[in-house]
Image: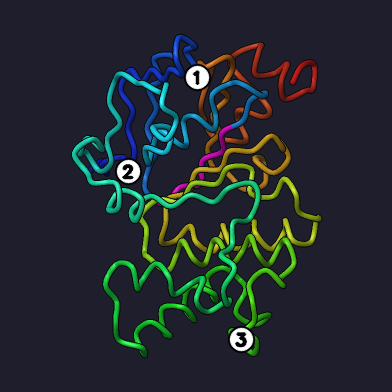
Amino acid sequence: MVEEPVIKTVDLNCYFGSLQVLKNLNIEIQPNEIIGIIGPANSGKTTFLRALNRLNYLHRTYTQTGEILLDGCDISRIGDNLLRKKIGIIFALPQVLPISIFDNVAYGPKVHGMTDKKAVSRSVEEALKKAYLWEEVKDRLRESAVRLSGGQQQRLCIARTLAVEPELILYDEPCSGLDPISTAKVEDAMQELKASYTQILVTNNTSQASRVSERCAFFLMGELVEIGPTKTLFTNPKDKRTDDYITGKFG
């Protein structure tokens, strides 16, 4: 039996005013996979991510046509709060709240109705463990989150997303400002999360895409040029433009 894709887009077109940023995008994201999205700047990668939980509509000039299906349901039929609970996003710059480490992670469960203090504490601990951060912060949960290092703050953002039990996690250049050690810890967390979550990684770092993802998609000027198993796409791409990008001839 073939599983329903977690995400499916049908002829998705995205516009900011008269500028078309994504063109007739048709893509399927399968359960529990890590899919990498690569391509040069202004290729539509971030617009694609933000379309999945309707963040693009924060721009007053944004419009789109086509469909985005989450588990077979058109996301236009899902309320914003529920959609963003199901689809969490991690941005390039960590966006921690200026409150304690504990309260950063507890914020989501409380907003979504969790009131039992023991349940909230369990949720916080589980999320921090999944994000590979618990051992580093378990004795300082009441300290301000802004005192954490950049890499720790990014893993805290992952934990905050996990605490509301999403189905899909989006990463928009999550390691762009991190050192190699912090990057490795974020990548380790992603691999551990694969058993329970579907993940989409937008990255300009082709080496990271090759390390982390099982499938990879190459975007160029708003179009999906090709998609396939990461190893195949990096060693034997079907399209010369993909090969030119991967080998650094443009980017």
With respect to residue 24, does 176 lie above or below? below
Name the residue at 21% across, 38% down: 72
Residue type at tag 3:
Lys
Of 156 and 218, nearer the camera is 156
Q: Secondary structure at mark 1?
A: strand
The circle on residue 224 is 1
Q: Quadrant of the C terminus?
A: top right
Q: Quadrant of the N terminus?
A: top left
Residue type at tag 2:
Val
Q: Earlier in the sequence, mark 2 or mark 3?
A: 2
Distance in Å between CA atoms under marks 3 and 1:
43 Å
With respect to residue 186, does 93 lie above or below? above
Of 104 and 129, nearer the camera is 104
Q: Residue 18 colored magenta?
A: no
Crowd class of label 3 (few under 14; some 14 to 19; many from 20; radius 10 Å): some
Crowd class of label 1 (few under 14; some 14 to 19; many from 20; radius 10 Å): many
Q: Secondary structure at mark 3?
A: loop
Name the residue beneath numbered marker 3. 138
With respect to residue 103, does 60 lie above or below? above
Q: Secondary structure at mark 2?
A: loop
Q: Which residues are magenta?
A: 32-37
With respect to residue 70, does 247 lie above or below? above
Name the residue at 29% across, 82% down: 115
Name the residue at 27% across, 53% down: 82
Residue type at tag 1:
Leu
Name the residue beneath numbered marker 2. 6
Mark toward the viewer: 2 or 3: 3
Q: Position of residue 27 (x, y in %)?
A: 39, 27
